[in-house]
Image (cartoon, helix red, strand yellow):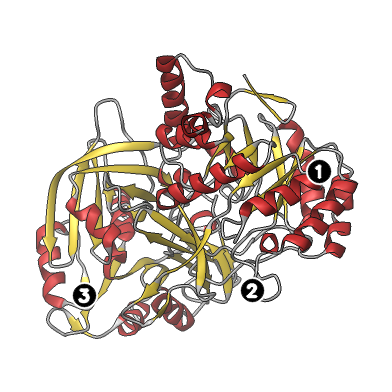
């Protein structure tokens, strides 16, 4: 068992937010290799999301421009939340308030008996003044987190953007505000062009890049955050196989997110978990023992 | 629970950018897709991340067939690979028809695939049908028909006039609607299907079923990536389709 945010988890793997949009769709997957799941981000108001195309295949990567398409808080509270009780794994609810006043609208959710909330301050496919992501504004992020923290008693995770001038400063600021864990990180804003039509593929020009191409970039950020703060890190971005997951743990991730790899192989979690177990056995190590272990090599 | 199944090609034919291939089931494995359903197809290539949604051309107890046009890296890799992973079968399928009279089938290019599978079931049920295939390249269509489509009659409209009647997708649509059909099944570019749909006399053709396509990441309703606007309505192709059905009341139904 893996202890994480006061919960005993069966494995250190989780399904990242946004990967499976609706609770009912998880039934199409074997959930055995996962310790918990993070639901798709909900916003105060329902969102249709961005115009098509929303998906593009890159080399060793995928682009998405979904734009937080979701049912909105009211429908979530009425229809999805009651179903969580019967869900076979612990669930993290992901939310994205766009302003301090929107945080107040989430109060009915904060009053629920929820294990953990992930505050998504980093979706690259929606706008927050001047085209910046909320997590790129450290002071505004502080205020949002402070307000959520004051109203929610469960575990609070913040998902940060990888596109930060100084991720360590943000991480320390958020931990100061009482965050229990950090999810490092979201997708990277990227660009793909149609060279025949001579224009960007996506109507919003930039789109989020995920998949194996971003793994080394994610590992660097996990490494930096691990050096800066003591809260557990959720590693998200680029895991395709067990070696990737082990690399994330060695860099400092306490738990490892599986994301777009599920689109390539719905059974990828089973293979990754089997590979992790074989590695730990071969090395006579525990999962807890390998979290951040690579840092020892460079002390 | 989603299946991911490894299959091996045993036969492939290519006509320029169009390829047909047949794969056999491994021992103890047999999938049972219905006409109109699709698979997300993945190769062993590491540099192509996402699988590609491909409709089933035909399937029986010994194997499965696909018709694929080389359009980009993903479809080219599928054509060039001997081993493929199939995720699925996915999506809904052609129903009915819930109307009397001759069954009309209108294919645009590679959209022939799911209609071929449907026709094979019509043949076994001895239903009367007519298939019109709209293509750009008439010579290519002639070769495809003589090589793999020997089970039934096809009427071709080619844009270059090199085989069958000369005309585009709209001409093909006008033609099939002039044949007194009672229902219409289509798989073609969205704009062609929308144009043909608008020409349908609803008191005569009471069951219209259209097979849609879109870029997808998952194919099983998880990613919300395949949003498409069709006949003024927004649909997720993998979850609401790929077949959308328009019955007598002029609404897009699942």
Classify mark 2: helix, strand or loop: loop
SS at badge 1: loop
**Residue A25 shows up from this direction:** yes
Spot occupied by residue B224 in the image (x, y as percentages of width and height): 56, 57
Return the chain for callout 2. Answer: A
Which quadrant would the N terminus of chain A be assigned to in this image?
Answer: top right
Q: CA distance from mark 1 to mark 2?
A: 27 Å
Per the image, the residue denoted by label 2 is A131
Question: What residue sits right under mark 1 in the picture?
Answer: A178
Residue at 19% in and 64% down: B18
Disc nearer the start of the sequence (1/2): 2
Q: Nearer the viewer, mark 1 or mark 2?
A: 1
Compute the Cα span from label 3 to label 1: 69 Å
Residue A246 vertical position relative to residue B217 in the rendered view, above or below: above
Which residue is at 43% across, 82% downward?
B195
Chain of the residue under label 1: A
Residue nearest the viewer, comparing B135 with A36: A36
Q: Which residue is mark 3?
A: B156
């Amino acid at each position: 068992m893996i202890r994480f945010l006061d919960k005993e988890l069966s494995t250190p793997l989780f399904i990242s937010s946004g990967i499976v949009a609706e609770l009912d769709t998880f039934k199409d997957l074997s959930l055995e290799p996962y310790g918990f799941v993070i639901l798709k981000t909900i916003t105060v108001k329902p969102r249709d999301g961005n115009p098509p195309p929303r998906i593009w295949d890159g080399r060793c990567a995928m682009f998405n421009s979904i734009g937080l398409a979701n049912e909105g808080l009211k429908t979530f509270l009425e229809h999805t939340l009651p179903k969580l009780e019967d869900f076979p794994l612990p669930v993290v609810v992901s939310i994205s308030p766009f302003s301090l006043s929107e945080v107040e609208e989430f109060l009915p959710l904060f009053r629920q008996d929820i294990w953990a909330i992930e505050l998504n301050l980093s979706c690259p496919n929606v706008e927050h003044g001047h085209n910046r992501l909320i997590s790129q504004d450290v002071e505004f992020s502080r205020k949002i987190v402070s307000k959520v923290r004051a109203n929610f008693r469960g575990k609070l995770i913040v998902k940060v953007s990888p596109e930060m001038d100084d991720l360590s400063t943000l991480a320390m600021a958020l931990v100061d505000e009482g965050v229990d864990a950090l999810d490092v990180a979201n997708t990277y804003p990227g660009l793909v062009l149609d060279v025949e039509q001579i224009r960007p593929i996506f109507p919003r020009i930039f789109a989020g890049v995920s998949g194996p191409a971003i793994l080394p970039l994610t590992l660097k950020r996990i490494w930096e955050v691990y050096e800066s703060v003591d809260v557990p890190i959720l590693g998200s971005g680029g895991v395709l196989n067990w070696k990737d997951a082990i690399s994330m743990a060695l860099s400092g991730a306490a738990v490892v997110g599986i994301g777009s790899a599920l689109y390539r192989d719905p059974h990828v979690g089973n293979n990754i978990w089997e590979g992790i177990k074989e590695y730990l056995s071969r090395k006579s190590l525990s999962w807890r023992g390998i979290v951040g272990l690579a840092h020892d090599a460079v002390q | 629970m989603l299946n991911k199944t490894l299959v091996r090609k045993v036969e492939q034919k290519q006509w320029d950018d169009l390829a047909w291939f047949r794969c056999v089931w491994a021992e103890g494995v047999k999938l049972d897709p219905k006409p109109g359903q699709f698979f997300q197809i993945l190769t062993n290539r590491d540099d192509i991340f996402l699988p590609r949604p491909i409709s089933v051309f035909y399937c029986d107890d010994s194997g499965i067939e696909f018709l694929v046009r080389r359009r980009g890296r993903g479809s080219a890799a599928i054509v060039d690979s001997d081993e493929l992973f199939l995720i699925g079968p996915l999506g809904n399928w052609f129903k009915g028809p819930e109307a009397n009279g001759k069954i009309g089938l209108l294919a645009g290019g590679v959209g022939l695939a799911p209609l071929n599978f449907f026709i094979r079931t019509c043949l076994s049920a001895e239903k009367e049908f007519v298939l019109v295939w709209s293509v750009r390249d008439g010579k290519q269509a002639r070769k495809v028909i003589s090589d793999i489509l020997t089970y039934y009659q096809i009427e071709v409209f080619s844009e270059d006039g090199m085989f069958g009647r000369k005309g585009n997708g709209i001409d093909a649509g006008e033609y099939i609607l002039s044949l007194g059909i009672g229902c219409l099944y289509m798989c073609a570019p969205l704009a062609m299907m929308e144009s043909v749909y608008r020409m349908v006399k609803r008191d005569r053709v009471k069951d219209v079923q259209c097979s849609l396509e879109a870029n997808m990441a998952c194919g099983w309703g998880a990613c919300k990536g395949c949003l498409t606007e069709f006949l003024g309505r927004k649909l997720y192709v993998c979850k609401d389709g790929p077949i959308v059905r328009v019955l007598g009341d002029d609404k897009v139904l699942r």
